[in-house]
Image (cartoon, rainbow, N blue to C red):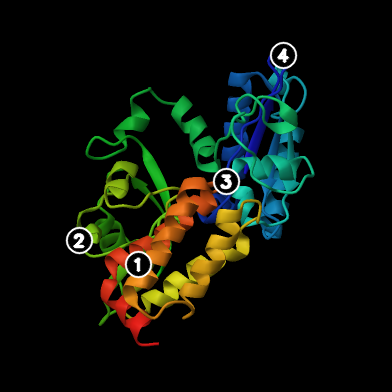
Amino acid sequence: MLRVIRRPLSAMRMKASRVVFKDRAILDYDPFAVIEGMTIAAYATGAARGIIYLRYEYPETNLRLEKAVADAYQANLLGKNIAGTNFSFELYVRRGGGAYICGEEGSLLNSLEGKHPFPRNRPPFPVTNGFENLPTVVNNVETLAAAAQIMRRAVEWYPSLGLNGQAGTKVVSLSGDVQRPGNYEVPFGLPLRTLIYDWAGGPVAGRHIQAVTMAGLSGGFLSGEALETATIDEPSIRSKGSMLGAAGMIVLDDSRDMIEAAHNAIEFFAHESCGKCFPCRLGTQRLTERLSGEGPVELQVWLDEVNDLNAAMKAVSACGLGMAAPLVIESLINQFPARVQEFVEKR
């Protein structure tokens, strides 16, 4: 997560990004791209300071990043009067405690301030009341890493990289049951099938793909016709009932039990819930229990209860974790109704 704190006149502002699978790779292999992007953003906004907020679980990345920042200072590309100009920009690395909830901007801001990482109520929004109650802008590693390349070219260059009317590219973190998992920079608008089968090699011989998670786990499962027709862009993925988000995808072949996959996802959300709001704190726990075999044994009663939990969580949770977690079980019910019925009625 990256923050650039800016000070136009007497105010300070900050830019930020979440470090995930793909972002860790960018910081490991090209940290200077991110440093350069942050410096460009700082120059454009009048920033005086920047903070890189890094997950505590990435000690090797931290060492590489600290060295890159130190090298940039030594080369007078950070600090006072950069490259002999009147522009000065200080950059710091700060390590978080590893909480998943710190991917939410309010929680991250609280963590940076040494507070409990609870999401903040909005309004006010970070753009007016963010870090240290100052105007704050949130951004991401991938965007900042692309900034310098965009600046070097004509304005038409980046939009032209997309397909089918979509602009630009996206780094997809692809894992699970494919032969060549990894990070893939794809043009927006690329067919999902092309990425999974042509680029990543598809499943091993004798297996077929039954589902792909979207937005890491937060977008739930895509299955069936959607795997054939979806393209990698937000409008297409949302039209299938999911979301692209940070573009983490997990491929599940027919050796996987979808009930178990959904249970693991909801259990993760229950563990990582910050506990601030009642709907998420209790809802994720109750959904985990329902996927563990507890609760009604009549299908319609089970569905009514689960759907009621999902609706409450999406309507009144304090942040995106509680709002997105229901997509896992909603997509399970919609895409795999026979497996859900078998699970509920044969306990």
Between disc 3 and disc 2, the foreground one is 3
Between disc 2 and disc 4, the foreground one is 2
Q: Which residue has dot 4 on it?
A: 86
What's the distance in space between the residues labelled 3 and 2, CA to CA?
A: 33 Å
Tag 3 and tag 2, C-beta contact below 8 Å: no
Q: Is residue 204 above or below residue 163?
A: below
| Amino acid tagged 3 | Ala
Is 329 displayed left or right of 76 in the figure? left
What's the distance in space between the residues labelled 3 and 1, CA to CA?
A: 24 Å
Label 4: element kind: loop
What's the distance in space between the residues labelled 2 and 4, CA to CA?
A: 57 Å
Q: Which residue has dot 3 on it?
A: 318
Report the residue that reaches farthest toward the bottom. Answer: 346
Label 1: element kind: helix
Q: Quadrant of residue 108?
A: top right
Q: Which residue has dot 2 on it?
A: 225
Whichever of labels 3 and 2 marks the residue nearer the N terminus, that label is: 2
Label 3: element kind: loop
Q: How many marks?
A: 4
Whichever of labels 2 and 4 marks the residue nearer the N terminus, that label is: 4
Whichever of labels 3 and 1 marks the residue nearer the N terminus, that label is: 3
Q: Residue at x 68, y 15 (%)?
A: 8
